[in-house]
Image (cartoon, grey):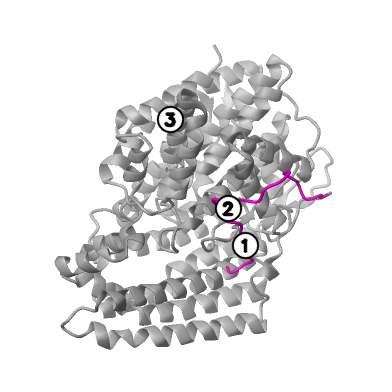
Amino acid sequence: MTDQPASSPTAPPTGQLGVPPADAPPHWDLDQLYVLGSDQLQQDLARLEELRAAFMRHGARLAQDAPPSAAEFAGMVGELDQITRLVNRLSGFASLAFAQDATDQKALSFMSKLDETLTVAGNDLLFFELWWKNLPDGEADVLAAGLPDYGHWLSRTRAFKPHTLSEAEEKIINLKNVTGSEAMVNLYDAVTTRYRFDGSFLPDGQGRPLTREELGVHVRSAAPEIRQGAYRELHRVYGEQGPVLAQLYQTVVRDWRLEQVRLRRHPSPQAARHKANDLSQETVDSLLRVCRQRAPEIFGRYFRQKARRLGLPLLRRYDLYAPLAPAGGRLDFAQGLREVAEAFRAFGDDYAALALEVAEKGRLSARPAPGKQSGAFCASIEPGAAPWVLMSFNGQRQDLFTLAHELGHAVHSQLAGVNNVFHFHSSLPLAETASTFGEMLLAQRLAQQAQTEEERDALRFHLLDDAYATVGRQAFFALFEIEAHDLVEAGATADELAEAYWRNISEQFGDSLELSEEFRWEWVSIPHFFHTPFYVYAYSFGQLLVYSLWRVRQRQGPEFVPRFKALLARGGSASPEAILAEAGLGPLDDDFWASGFEVIESFLPD
């Protein structure tokens, strides 16, 4: 998405931090990118075609026996950089237009057509990637040495050589995905975004239809009957549609295994994600092993403590995110943004200014709306430009933490903007670092503002709720995915997948809380399972990493801040292990992950 250039990450806007006045949560100005059907959109599509045609002329040169000169190679990489930026802008706009209203038929049609256009263009340019992967090591080393700024991308591309097929096969897979797995994911989004939930469990008794975002607010209600009603209604709707959604899921899973295991020869379905994340199987195995060992016991102790604080003999699954006390007054958006900005100021005015830039430039969609995609995200489109953030701000304290999380992503994006387009995005495991740190900075500010022990306790319990949701819950999601992919390969039915999920959550919770049958179908309501197989362990990785970083910050004091910013500025220019080693962290073994659980234990009340 080309936008007005953001201020340099190393020299952010100066002056007094301000918050744009707003009586209601803002909606982003997507016209900064394009307007559907506009001349500018058509011109950029035509420009992409010109760049594609020009790049294809390099095919004849690369087919010669002699490799290109350093200057020729640098020119090709520069052209590919330019094409990638334009592709990211076009595809980013399509995704954002769909996310802001998944019921918009024009947006859905444009996204589908663009997917096809970009797939064809990508196939035409595939020859360069295949040539680079197959170049002899000595010749590749000489050319890569001349482009040190692109070094990690060039080496990572060659690392996938064992999993790369012939040019014809790669093209067929790309074309197949447009009407295959990608279409299944788009269908899942289009269908589930249209779901409406019966609000008759609410005290007003009106029973008006609720979106998922509106329903989700009530799972944190202070009233037990409202929490129960919200969860039951959520899983009633998804449960009724469970067999159909499970068919979509099974299709996505089979497609993933067919491509990644049978064709590309990754040793397992999840190994393909580890490779893309630039992580070793050993690191991920260690993470999930420690989470499986420690999470049920530590969070089980917490759930029992929370039940006592709520005056319950045993916590129900409905009560997992229950507040200790009724929520205070409703926050308006400007107040919430100010709180987050002031929390970020602990890392300097420049850090807070980068977060505020998203709102100031009209790139924040925080207004609840029908058809709007559920959840929250930060879309970083190109280096040097402020990213786009989507969430729904309903005036609750949890919304503050969501805002801090997504604006943390935004700061990370802008600090990493010093990199080229191929090193701009960090790997998934490190992508959650700044976002989770943003939540910790907000928690620190709220703790400093707390006037009573009850307020401090409420915040501590919130941190434990969040730790469970991000570490324990996501790790067990990942464990479920591993089992589910194997079950689908073995021909499991939708009911058998639901039974596997029930075993998974039963292991998580043990006898520490009471589970209800409707949670058996919870898994079909988790978009990440459909969108990005094996994504979710990145949350556990990021959260435990941040707890370790928080301890480093406590030891180092002010000198930690520039080191942390430098870590974020690396983007994806090195492997996660290499970046963390530079920051003095690691190795990423069982002891490392266990130290993160020690921080979680420190939150537990005495």
> Magenta residues: mostly which secondary structure?
loop
Task: Give yes or no for residue 465 being in the magenta stretch.
Answer: no
Please state which amino acid type lies under the numbered disc 1.
Answer: Ala
Q: Residue 344's quadrant in the figure? A: top right
Determine which residue is flagged by label 2: 377
Please state which amino acid type lies under the numbered disc 3.
Answer: Ser
Question: Nearest the camera: 264 or 541?
Answer: 541
Q: Which element is circle 1 on? A: helix
Side (left or right) of 74 relative to 245: left
Determine which residue is flagged by label 1: 99
Q: Residue at x 60, y 58 (%)?
A: 386
Q: Which residues are magenta?
A: 1-22
Please state which amino acid type lies under the numbered disc 2.
Answer: Phe
Q: Which element is circle 2 on? A: strand
Q: Earlier in the sequence, mark 1 or mark 2?
A: 1
Determine which residue is flagged by label 3: 548
Side (left or right) of 50 relative to 333: left
Where's residue 207, x and y in %?
79, 48
